[in-house]
Amino acid sequence: MNEPPAHPTPMIETHDVVKVYADGKVRALDGVDLTVGPGEFVAVTGPSGCGKSTLLGLLAALDTPDSGTIRVGSHDLVRLQDSDRFRRQAVGLVFQLHNLLPRLTVLENVEIAMMGSDRPRGDRAGHAARLLEGVGLGAMADRRPPQLSGGERQRVAVARALANDPPLLLADEPTGSLDSRSVATVLALFEGLRADRGVTVVLVTHDGDVAAAADRIIPMLDGRVVGA
Ligand SMILES: Nc1ncnc2c1ncn2[C@@H]1O[C@H](COP(=O)(O)OP(=O)(O)OP(=O)(O)O)[C@@H](O)[C@H]1O
Ligand SMILES: [Mg+2]
């Protein structure tokens, strides 16, 4: 009989990732080595400009590194053929500026993320409604984003990020503009996702109290992961 592997396959594994921005002067990432296990909840912290958003953007295949390797699940992001498909299937993204569409209802904002997915059209509205219930906003499905508080909008953004059941959630300062109660709600949501569905969560934050909610803190400085 085969022994089970000593270490499960990581959800994220990067080696020596370098990202230099176009003018060649900014080495935004300067050799990032990072491993995150499946079902881990990690917080990436560090001073402004140290490369946190750049790293998250590479993990989401929004951009490509100049050198180094990045694996997310079974995907080699350096050789990825179809990054739209990867983003639709493999990751959920939450940004500080959540980019909800103001003219659509909350339900439609979640449903629209399922465009191009395998979920049958007839099932999408029901699934969106369930996701909104999951973030405590079932009663607000018919409102539009301008009629919600900042914390409520952020929870819609989380529901939208989960629309296609991604195994990995990437969140860049998702609590940055929120009051402390909304921060607690969003953090509880992330913890619940990990506990209930085994979702891996990578959270970028300036805030030490927010980072303390994670299993592990990944400190960055000058484009590198330090002492993790
Ligand atoms: N598109 C770009 N073109 C040129 N330089 C960029 C670009 N995006 C980011 N940078 C630079 O790369 C470095 C890392 O930026 P990044 O946005 O990753 O930092 P950050 O850690 O997310 O900062 P913050 O906490 O302020 O969000 C910074 O020096 C920034 O000025
Ligand atoms: Mg940033």
Image: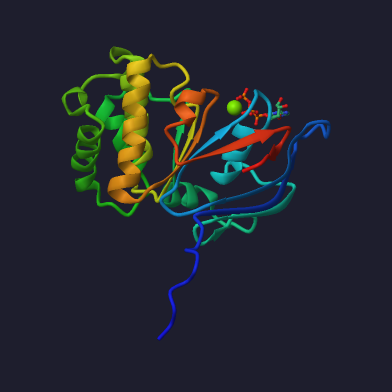
Question: Could you tell me which quadrant the N terminus lies in?
Answer: bottom left
Which image quadrant shows ligand 1?
top right
Nearer-the-camera pick, 192 or 171: 192
Task: Give the quadrant of residue 187.
Answer: top left
> In which quadrant of the rendered image does the C terminus lie?
top right
The answer to whether residue 184 is seen in the rendering is yes
Say which residue appears at 29% left-offset and 15% top-offset: 148
Residue 83 at what x, y percent from top left? Answer: 54, 50
- How many marks do you count on the picture? 0
- Residue 44 position in % (x across, y down): 56, 35
On the image, the x and y values in percent for residue 10 come to 51, 58
Picture coordinates of residue 115, whole percent (x, y): 35, 44
The colour scheme used to paint the residues is: rainbow
- Asked whether 103 or 227 is in front, the reply is 227
Q: In the figure, is residue 151 to the left or right of 223?
A: left
Residue drawn at 66 percent across, 41 percent down: 227
Asked if residue 211 lies left or right of residue 76, the reply is left
Q: Is residue 163 visible?
A: no
Q: Up-down: is 125 above or below 137?
A: below
Task: Name the residue: 23% across, 36% down.
Answer: 134
Closer to the camera in the image, 186 or 165: 186
Judged from this view, the residue extending furthest toward the left is: 139
Extreme-bottom residue of the structure = 1
The front one of 15 and 212 is 212
Q: Is residue 199 above or below residue 80?
A: above
Question: Relative to residue 102, is residue 91 drawn left or right?
Answer: right
